[in-house]
Amino acid sequence: MLNRVRSAVAHLVSSGGAPPPRPKSPDLPSAPSPQTAAPPEAPRSPPARAGSGSAAPAKTVEARACFSRPTFLQLSPGGLRRADDHAGRAVQSPPDTGRRLPWSTGYAEVINAGKSRHNEDQACCEVVYVEGRRSVSGAPREPSQGQGLCFYYWGLFDGHAGGGAAEMASRLLHRHIREQLKDLSCWSSQKEVTHESLVVGAIENAFQFMDEQMARERRGHQVEGGCCALVVVYLLGKVYVANAGDSRAIIVRNGEIIPMSREFTPETERRRLQLLGFLKPELLGGEFTHLEFPRRIQPKELGQRMLYRDQNMTGWAYKKIELEDLRFPLVCGEGKKARVMATIGVTRGLGDHNLKVCSSTLPIKPFLSCFPEVRVYDLTQYEHCPDDVLVLGTDGLWDVTSDCEVAATVDRVLSAYEPNDPSRYTALAQALVLGARGTPRDRGWRLPNNKLGSGDDISVFVIPLGGPGSYS
Amino acid sequence: MLNRVRSAVAHLVSSGGAPPPRPKSPDLPSAPSPQTAAPPEAPRSPPARAGSGSAAPAKTVEARACFSRPTFLQLSPGGLRRADDHAGRAVQSPPDTGRRLPWSTGYAEVINAGKSRHNEDQACCEVVYVEGRRSVSGAPREPSQGQGLCFYYWGLFDGHAGGGAAEMASRLLHRHIREQLKDLSCWSSQKEVTHESLVVGAIENAFQFMDEQMARERRGHQVEGGCCALVVVYLLGKVYVANAGDSRAIIVRNGEIIPMSREFTPETERRRLQLLGFLKPELLGGEFTHLEFPRRIQPKELGQRMLYRDQNMTGWAYKKIELEDLRFPLVCGEGKKARVMATIGVTRGLGDHNLKVCSSTLPIKPFLSCFPEVRVYDLTQYEHCPDDVLVLGTDGLWDVTSDCEVAATVDRVLSAYEPNDPSRYTALAQALVLGARGTPRDRGWRLPNNKLGSGDDISVFVIPLGGPGSYS
């Protein structure tokens, strides 16, 4: 993900942009206390940042006091060091001997090929108990009303410009969701408002609260950078997939592919970004134009006719070039190189409250939204077999692997294991990560077809939808 | 459509809200000169407006100097009078004896049951020749570059709060499209920009230019009210369907239904409307809140917890009621009763530049957008048979007729005619209009199942996609 944020580290200044303070929820710790302590040998030197070209300011980097991996990996200090080795890029999974993840979920990850010092992906997998909200008097509710409920939770967080936001989100986002879901226990049926829409609203609001907490606490706790967040909640028969960023989730069911998220990039969100620039031109600081042109306009082209697209257009039309069309375009570049304000390549995520346009004090944040899109999948509507899985991956996986290739790997790996062997999902996650990483050859990581593998951090969850132990 | 605009007529005041003037295109007439002159017996008295409850101000109504129907109906003064009769509601179609519409297109219409004085729907069907744009020197281009091209054009315009906007759009919108398409002849291939995206952009811009012309000329030419616009352009093998409002287009192909538009209503556009109110709170004038609640909040509920939805949410969550939540909601009501600012039930369309919130000077227009959504259908990708049709209808048809019922009528009527009988498409249009109108029974217009038929104006085009004379 790091190469998606140009010059972001160099602009991690401590100035403004914070939203008005909101009272903290009582159950939420304000300081993200690391669950995995920094190993004594964890390096503290400034990370080498290939592609950014400029060293990060010392104060930001020194503040990055610890490096952790998901607790469920149960890494020893030596194991943590191996997980942090860019040369070997060993694939990490929870140990076979320990307690399995809920639903026998499979997980695997690998560090990047050197573009950032540490693995900036983070992951979380939890069973979360929601206690009903207490009544106004402070007394607990009637047992029938406030018994509480449980949800299963998986999260992938792909950090950029530092690992702080991803670490904080991996520790706290599910607690924000729990806090929001407390209202469910006092919900009485109202027309139009379904139970499902309340869970969706709870997840949406939890993302916003998480982002606001990062804004509040970024100075005290060095929440550097930002992160994409892809989250799955299973509650009362339904799977909720919430995505903010360019991670991706698909269900592979009986060989069929069901997309469960879409990526949020300058290209997919062009019209939202342009509309914001059009309605709030002050956010462009006189430096950018919200209009899109097929190429950069030259000053000598003033007065000529040129193709353009405005916020409310899907097609292209001609206009006469005016002076302000010479400004830098709000959205530019194509594919993986597309950028908002020449700075960032994703348009949804958590954190990034200090991110500024290169050589400017213009904040990126209003264009970068923390709100996820939530898709719902009803598990009870289909008889799932042990080979039906929900695959979550950060962009390290999807940059070099198509949906169809993932479905083929699902078929190939799972058919090599007994249906009731709970280790098959971890084997599948490992195969997916290895298939995206490739092997070292010709001075690079290469796939069997000799194309370059992903040099990014790669993290994958494989969640069985009908496997042993699923939603039991 | 009229019942979709509450109190709109009473607020047709002549004050502000016009966008900055834009130079007129030289080829476009500034005054909409009626093609069908007002018959001497055309009534000039204020229209009876069932449902609005209040009489329109005299100056507005008196200014409505003429009433016309599409020229291709070739109505005599007597025929015009019959078309204007709310009691008989005779179905109108082009005469069998005259020149057929291009592609043997079928058309039928019927006036409303009395809710507005005249039929406020309008229609247009034309073959339009586009001359290439002249070079800067004024000399015509090389023949190879500027031969010009032809497009086929169909438009349905469903007026509200007066027929002026619909009449003006039916006379001029295709000319704006022609003007925009002139650029196509000087188009040289640029990366990313396809020929198709240029046609889409031309149509999108033509809607905007049409709307701006209405804003400029509304005082001089009494362009009362507004209109939904559903337009089809056929050019170089592709069908472009542009929709702004709640009319609807579907293709029925070999019995399969392919939706070619979607409706724009306060419900389908909730998030766009709320976002606009959120980013530009001054548009709400301190009278409305952009938040949505399941019901109107009472002052005594201040401080209590209540479900709400914000612009970036699809789900519902709880918040504590604050003072400004007591304001009237920007979007309220359900289904056909949903309204923006308690005033209008469609959110895209042309005109309405004078429309204000009831008892207020707050303009509706920024929430009502003139931009269409354009869908493209490639006619060359499928071998069409004479029974494959594109059906366009105003909401008078769709309020009481489902897609499936339309497809069943297509099958029933067309199979009763020889495939090469060009009158079959008009017979189909008539059957669709009759099926939506019903017959007078039990003090109302009723369908065979005894439900109420549509009391609205109903207009239908049936465009054969593989019939005799299609795109020849």
Image (cartoon, coloured by chain):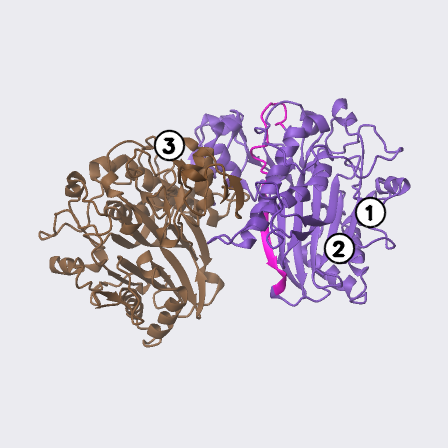
Chain colours: A brown, B purple
B407 relative to A236 in the view: left or right: right
Q: Secondary structure at mark 3?
A: loop
Q: Nearer the viewer, residue A140 or B363?
A: B363
The amino acid type of the residue labelled 3 equals: Gly
Category of crowding for the residue at label 1, using alpha-carbon neighbours closer than 10 angstroms: few (below 14), some (14–19), many (at least 20): some
Residue type, numbered disc 1: Leu
Q: Chain of mark 3?
A: A
Asked whether the viewer can see residue B399, the reply is no
> Same chain, marks 2 and 3?
no
Dot 2 falls on a residue whose secondary structure is helix
In the rendered image, residues at marks 2 and 1 fall on the same chain: yes
Q: What is the spatial separation of the Cα atoms under label 2 and label 1, in whole angstroms?
A: 14 Å
Main SS, magenta residues: loop
Mark 3 packing: few (<14 Cα in 10 Å), some, or many (20+)?
A: some
Q: What's drawn in magenta, residue-wise?
A: B356-380
In the rendered structure, find residue A285 and report the number of the disc placed on it: 3
**Residue at the right extreme, as displayed:** B78
Label 2, on which residue?
B102
Residue B241 to residue A462: above or below? above
Residue B73: mark: 1
CA–CA distance in space, label 2 to label 3? 52 Å
